[in-house]
Image: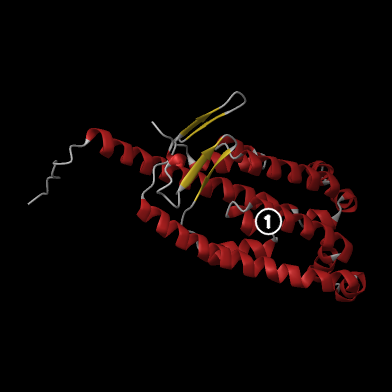
Amino acid sequence: MDHPEQNTSVRRYLAHVGLFGTTQLHLRNPYIIVGWSLLFPGFGHLLLSKYVRGYLLFIWEIFVNVNAHVNLALFYSFTGRFEMAKDVLDINWVLLYIPTYLFAVWDSYRTTVDLNLQYILASREDAEVKMFNIDSIEINYLDKRKPWIALAWSALMPGLGQIYIHRIPSALFSMGWFIIMAYLSKLLPAIHYTLLGQFELAKSVVDAHWLLNIPCIYFWCMYEAYVNTVENNKIYDWEQSKFLKKHYQNKNFRMPFAR
């Protein structure tokens, strides 16, 4: 029997179950994607499974932000030190920062709208989904999992929720960058001193620039793990229903209706 991917009469597929993760089309709210792109360029694209574009924008954000001192300017602004905020900004890098930042927001909205249209067309084609993939190094398959468990693991350590639902690229990205940000910001020593009641020492050891990146990454990991668990469950139900109808339901069977 041919694999679903070999059916050349089908132009679009709702999902692909690969060795390192499940990629699928589903309806998304463009404004939510835009919101994540506003918080951190690249996050909106990663939610759309546009990994290459998302990684490029994320790395661009880190590189230019560091050189422009945007986070430090935000930190000083939040604490009412507006003159220090103006002085710390590097104009050369800020002017480079703005165009690509606006592009990330615009492109995430445009791509979300396009992928929503592709989802509608793919759902009408009703193509088969290969729900099991096995190789010498990995196994991946569609299965029902609990969204709150994925969220809880991501809350304990960003990346673990993605491992739970077998999204390896997202897991490597989430866990790797969270560790980098936590190390550079001195987050764990600051937490340690805070628990000991040494608040002044905690404030002195922390690096505000890198610390401001952590909330975005932390909550994005929880959101991404939860949403993709929900959508994976939906595609599992869709594939299971399609399989049962095809193999076990007589085409002449008429559904009973209550009178």
* Numbered disc 1: secondary structure: helix
Q: Position of residue 8 (x, y in %)?
A: 43, 46
Residue projecting furthest to the right: 87
Residue 256 in sight here: yes
Which one is in front, 42 or 9? 9
Q: Where is residue 241 in the image (x, y as percent from the top left)?
A: 32, 40
Which corner quadrant of the image does residue 41 belong to?
Answer: bottom right
Q: Is residue 150 left or right of residue 251?
A: right
Mark 1 highlights which residue? 53
Residue 102 vs 119, above or below: the answer is below
Colour scheme employed for the rendering of this structure: secondary structure
Q: How crowded is mark 1: few (under 14 residues within 10 Å), some or many (20 or more)?
A: some
Q: In this view, does 26 lie to the left or right of 181?
A: left
Q: Where is residue 140 in the image (x, y as percent from the top left)?
A: 53, 32
**Amino acid marked by disc 1:** Arg
Q: Which residue is drawn at 58% across and 49% down?
A: 224
Q: Position of residue 48 (x, y in %)?
A: 57, 55
Q: Which residue is drawn at 12% across and 49% down?
A: 257
Residue 198 in sight here: no
Residue projecting furthest to the top: 136
Number of labels in the image equals 1
